[in-house]
Amino acid sequence: MSAGCAYVVSIAEGSDVTLNYGSADWLGLVRIIEQRTGLDGEKAIQTAKAKYNKRARVMGADEARNHMLKRAHDCDREMAVIQS
């Protein structure tokens, strides 16, 4: 989840979407999870990127982009809950 959010939020930032929490916040969370669990955070981010690239091929670039931007807003709400 956090790796996917790190990826989609970074894309949203490049699209000038205003969010309360940026990709740096999500990358920090990925690193914390990585340290505590031993999971490979970079691999998880690459997996999320591949998932969205596949979605773009299947659904079309515009629809995939719209889905990513919606997901970025969802991630923003999730981070608010995590921070509280």
Image: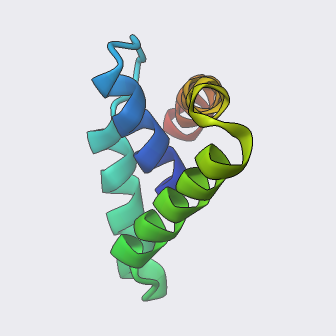
Identify which residue, 22 or 15, lies in the foreground: 15
Expressed as whole percent of the image width and height from the top left, the position of residue 52 reads 57, 51
Does 14 sit left or right of 50 as displayed? left
Does 23 sit left or right of 81 as displayed? left
Q: Vertically, is 6 above or below 69?
A: below
Expressed as whole percent of the image width and height from the top left, the position of residue 10 reads 35, 37
Q: Look at the image and tell me whether residue 1 can be seen.
A: no
Identify which residue, 20 or 4, lies in the foreground: 4
Report the quarter where the N terminus lies.
bottom right
Does 14 sit left or right of 84 as displayed? left
Residue at 29% over, 26% down: 14
Q: How many marks?
A: 0
Does 31 sit left or right of 43 as displayed? left
The residue most toward the bottom is 38
Q: How is the image coloured?
A: rainbow
Report the quarter where the C terminus lies.
top right
The residue most toward the right is 59
Residue at 32% over, 13% down: 16
Residue at 43% over, 88% down: 38
Q: Look at the image and tell me whether residue 66 can be seen.
A: yes
Give the quadrant of residue 69: top right
Give the quadrant of residue 25: top left
Expressed as whole percent of the image width and height from the top left, the position of residue 77 reads 61, 26
Identify which residue, 48 or 6, lies in the foreground: 48
Residue at 67% over, 28% down: 63
Expressed as whole percent of the image width and height from the top left, the position of residue 72 reads 54, 30
Identify which residue, 14 or 4, lies in the foreground: 14
